[in-house]
Amino acid sequence: MSRLVAAIALIVVLAVGAARADDGAGAASLQALVEALALPELVEVMREEGLAYGEGLEDELFPGRGGARWETTVNRIYDGGRIEAEMREALDRRLGEAEIAPLVAFFTSPRGARIVALELSARRAMLDPEIDKASRERLEEMQADGDPKLELVGRFIAANGLIEANVAGALNANYAFYTGLVDGRAFDYPVIEAQILDDIRRQAPEIREDTRTWLFSYLTMAYAPLDAATMEAYIGLSETRPGQDLNDALFEAVETVFQSISHELGLAAARFIAGQDL
């Protein structure tokens, strides 16, 4: 099997005062949190990332043969409403109304709203390959200069377990994609699960390094306007268990929906590889 790199569902969420609760959040409170986190806007960016990934799959697996039908298929699979619904359900399962109130208060405060806007703006900008490249070059410069902002960003990443969570999500998405290819009979020879797992394991080091580089380049760009005091406060909030619960809920939602999406992409790609949609 050729080497494939799954689209990584990278999501950075403010780790602020949320706690797990047995009862779901009230609809009004949940909607207020969704709006404060700008989840609909984030989902749209994630969808655009997915569409770009789908285009890359065509180039790698069946160049020039997908055309409009493959584009339509990828658009259908990357359904923004489906992704947002999974996020809402995860928040509703994990958070109660009493826990949502301080979250909404922070995210709608000038400081919180600014951080959300910076994260979203930077992630949208990273859709441009030239900006992505420039951000990586800027990261190299910061590393060479020993820029103190890198230490703060590194602590934020560690506090939220962003590298491990994203690597695990990418590996699981890769596995789902491969099984989709196999289920769709993309290969004219038998493929057993052990082969898939071995291939996925070989990809892990490169995925980890790319994830680390992407996170640092993205977050150093996003948080460039923030002063050290704001970053310290943000890291402190991120290290609390309530903040971890919020991140856990959203990562859980993203991983669930993207495993399903990846399997569907594999099934769809298999048809084009086998020539069934030519």
Image (cartoon, rainbow, N blue to C red):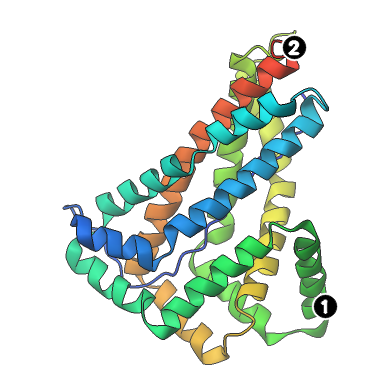
Answer whether labels 2 and 1 touch (C-beta < 8 Å).
no
Crowding at dot 1, Cα within 10 Å, few <14 / some 14-19 / many 20+, comes out as few
Extreme residue in the front direction: 68
Identify which residue, 109 or 266, lies in the foreground.
109
Residue ID for mark 1: 141
The structure residue drawn at horizontal position 42% and vertical position 84%, both measured from the top left corner, is 110
Indicate the quadrant containing the C terminus: top left, top right, bottom left or bottom right. top right
Placement of 45 over or under 217, stated as above or below:
above
Placement of 162 over or under 101, stated as above or below:
above
The amino acid marked with disc number 2 is: Gly
Which SS class for mark 2?
loop
User: Is tag 2's residue or tag 1's residue first in the polypeptide sequence?
Assistant: 1
Residue ID for mark 2: 275
Q: Give the quadrant of residue 7.
A: top right
Q: Is residue 2 visible?
A: no
The structure residue drawn at horizontal position 72% and vertical position 62%, both measured from the top left corner, is 213
Residue 24 position within the rendered picture, expressed as x and y whole percent measured from the top left: 20, 52
Which SS class for mark 1?
helix
The structure residue drawn at horizontal position 67% and vertical position 74%, both measured from the top left corner, is 221
Answer with left or right where residue 235 lies relative to residue 68.
left
Identify which residue, 186 or 21, lies in the foreground.
186
